[in-house]
Image (cartoon, rainbow, N blue to C red):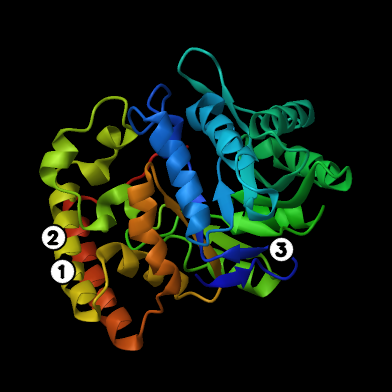
Amino acid sequence: MQYRQAGTDGPQLSVIGLGTWAIGGGDWKFGWGDQDEGAALGAITAAVEQGINWIDTAAIYGEGRSEELVGRAVRELPVADRPLLATKCGRIALGNGEIGQSLKRESVIAECESSLRRLQVDQIDLYQMHWPQPDEEIEEGWQALVDLQAQGKVRWIGVSNHSVSQMQRLEQIHSIQTLQPPYSMIARECEDEILPFCGGRGTGVICYSPMGKGLLTGAFTKERADSLTEKDHRSRDPRFQSPQLEINLKFVAELQQVADGLGWSMTDLAIAWTLRRPELTSAIVGARSPEQIHQTAAAGDRNLGVAAEAAVEAALAKRLQQLDAVGGAARPRV
C-alpha cells in the first residue's frame, strides 16, 4: 500500500480509503440495498489488515447506521491499529425518508456531537461539510468547523462537492485542508478547474466513487442493473439505465482489454487512473464485505504508465461521442 500526505498540512493517508456509504443499508433515500451487518464489520477489519489507514463515512449514510458500524468495528481493533476516521455534516435526516440540509452553526455542532457518539471517539480525525447547501450558509458552517477544530473536537477540516468559487469564499475564513469530489473515468468534471486549484493551494484531494458506483469493476452487467431494487439508489441513476448503460458496458469491455494487457483487474485500472493525478491523495473505495476490499486493495500498489493512460483516453473519447448522441449524463446529489 502506498501513502501520501493530504496537501500541505493534512494527514498521511493510504492511497485507498475505505468508503462506507453502502454499508448504511437500504432504508434511506440514497441507500445501496440491504446490508449484512457481519459482512460490513468484516470489511472494515479486512481493510485495516490490507494497510488502509483511514475510513470515510457520513452522518447521513443510513441515517447514522454507517457511523455506528464503523465505531463498533474500530473499537474492537487494537489501539495501535485503529484507522483515521473521516465523516461529514450538513445533511439531515428528516424522519420521513427525505433529506434536509443545514449548515447553521448549531446544527453543525449538534451533528458533530452525534457523530462523536456514534463513532465512539473523543475526536474526529477529518470533519467535512458534505455539500455546499444551502449556499448562503457555507461560511457559517465553515466557521463552525474552524471552531470545532480549535476546540479539539476534530483534527483536520475539509469540504466535499464544493466548487472553486465556493472554496475561495471559505478560504477568507480558514484554509481548506481537504476536498472530496466525485472523480472517476465517467465523472471527470473536477479536472479542469478544481484539481489545479487544489494543487496550487496545497489542499489534499480525496475522491469518491472512483469505480463509478460499480460500473467500472468489470463485474457489472445489464442483468445486474435490471435486478437493482428500489432500495438501491442506482436504480434511479441514468448511467445504470438505457441507453447510457449499454454505452458504459461497452466502454468497460474495452478497458478490460487494457487491464488484461497489464495483468491487472479492472478495478486496479479504474483506481490507478484516478491516482495518476498528482493532486490526488487518496481514492475512496467502497466495500460491503471482506471479499470486496480484498479485491480492490491491490490497487494501492499500482502505478499507471503512459501507454495505458493513452489507451484509456482513447476509450474515453469514444464513450463521450456516444453519450453526446444520446444526451449526456447525470448523477444524483447526496
Image mark for residue 250: 2
Tell me which amino acid carries mark 2. Answer: Lys
Q: Is residue 290 above or below residue 317?
A: above
| Label 2 crowd (10 A; few <14 / some 14-19 / many >=20) | few
Count of numbered labels shown in the rendering: 3
Q: Is residue 228 above or below residue 278?
A: above
Q: Is 143 positioned to the left or the right of 133 in the image?
A: right
Q: Residue at x 56, y 27 (%)?
A: 64
Tell me which amino acid carries mark 1. Answer: Glu
Residue highlighted by disc 1: 254
Q: Position of residue 238 (x, y in %)?
A: 25, 41
Question: Where is residue 225, by image quadrant?
Answer: top left
Q: Position of residue 319 (x, y in %)?
A: 20, 64
Residue highlighted by disc 3: 10
Tell whether label 1 touches label 2 (CB within 8 Å).
yes
Q: Secondary structure at mark 1?
A: helix
Judge whether residue 187 can be spotted in this image. Answer: no
Asked whether 280 or 65 is in front, the reply is: 65
Judge whether residue 309 can be spotted in this image. Answer: yes
Tell me which amino acid carries mark 3. Answer: Gly
Asked whether 167 or 296 is in front, the reply is: 296
Q: Is residue 168 above or below residue 313?
A: above
